[in-house]
Image: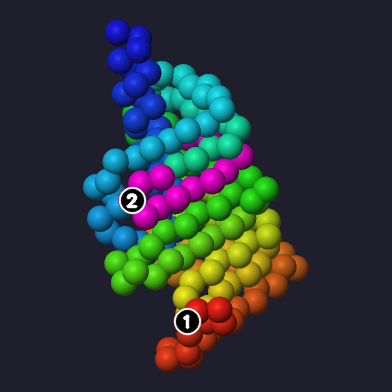
């Protein structure tokens, strides 16, 4: 019985961690329906409706075209639902292909996804690369429901490179 509860909770935990990685609004829509694979050196979880689950040591999550690599992941539950997911690393890395076949990669020291507000906050050496350009800064907020990016502030600057529509990035053939 305990093993079944742990397995159920692990599936919920991993689904939440994966949800945190849906950084781009244009992420591949079929990825959510694919099997999810998760591995980590260690898991520490409380099997209740209100509890935290921690994955540590080379956390790897993959589902369809989505790939996540982090040193640690923490998933917090409230009233039986996933409330927040935190990924940390040196850096934590997310990559995903959108429905147009374009790959997006995001790197940050810390990525926090709050499900109730659909907000992702990336802090520390943030770099987001997409085929048409990149975005860098120390703090970037991304609202999944609106697609709005908010960055900088607190003395940190944001830098962007936006390529013309018909120009391929250097190195592409």
Q: Determine whether, in the image, residue 14 is placed left or right of residue 128.
A: left
Instruction: Let me know if residue 64 appears in the view.
Output: yes
**Residue of label 2:** 64
Image point (55%, 53%), residue name: 93
Q: Label 1 to label 2, Cα distance in Å?
A: 25 Å
The residue range painted magenta reads: 62-76
**Residue of label 1:** 173
Residue in the foreground of this view, choosing between 77 and 103: 103
Q: Which mark is residue 97?
A: none
Q: Quadrant of residue 48?
A: top left
* Secondary structure category for the residue under label 2: loop
Labels 1 and 2: the sequence-earlier one: 2
Q: Main secondary structure of the magenta part?
A: strand
Q: Residue 141 location in percent, x, y?
A: 54, 62
Residue in the foreground of this view, choosing between 48 and 43: 43
Whether residue 143 is situated above or below residue 117 in the rendered picture:
below
Q: Residue 118 location in percent, x, y?
A: 40, 54
Q: Residue 109 location in percent, x, y?
A: 65, 51
Image quarter where the N terminus lies is top left
Image point (50%, 54%), residue name: 94
- Which callout, 1 or 2, points to the residue nearer the camera? 1
């Amino acid at each position: 019985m305990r093993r079944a509860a742990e397995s159920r909770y692990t599936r919920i935990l991993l689904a939440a961690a994966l949800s945190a990685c849906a950084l781009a609004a244009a992420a591949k829509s079929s990825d959510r329906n694919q099997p999810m694979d998760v591995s980590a050196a260690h898991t520490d979880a409380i099997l209740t409706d209100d509890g935290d689950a921690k994955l540590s040591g080379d956390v790897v999550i993959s589902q369809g075209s989505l790939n996540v690599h982090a040193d640690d992941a923490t998933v917090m539950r409230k009233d039986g639902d996933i409330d927040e997911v935190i990924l940390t690393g040196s850096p934590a890395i997310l990559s995903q292909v959108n429905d147009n076949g374009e790959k997006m990669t995001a790197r940050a020291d810390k990525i926090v996804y709050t499900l109730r507000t659909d907000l992702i906050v990336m802090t520390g050496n943030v770099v987001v690369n997409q085929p048409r350009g990149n975005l860098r800064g120390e703090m970037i907020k991304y609202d999944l429901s609106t697609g709005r990016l908010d960055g900088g502030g607190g003395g940190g600057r944001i830098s962007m490179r936006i390529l013309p529509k018909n120009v391929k990035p250097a190195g592409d053939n």
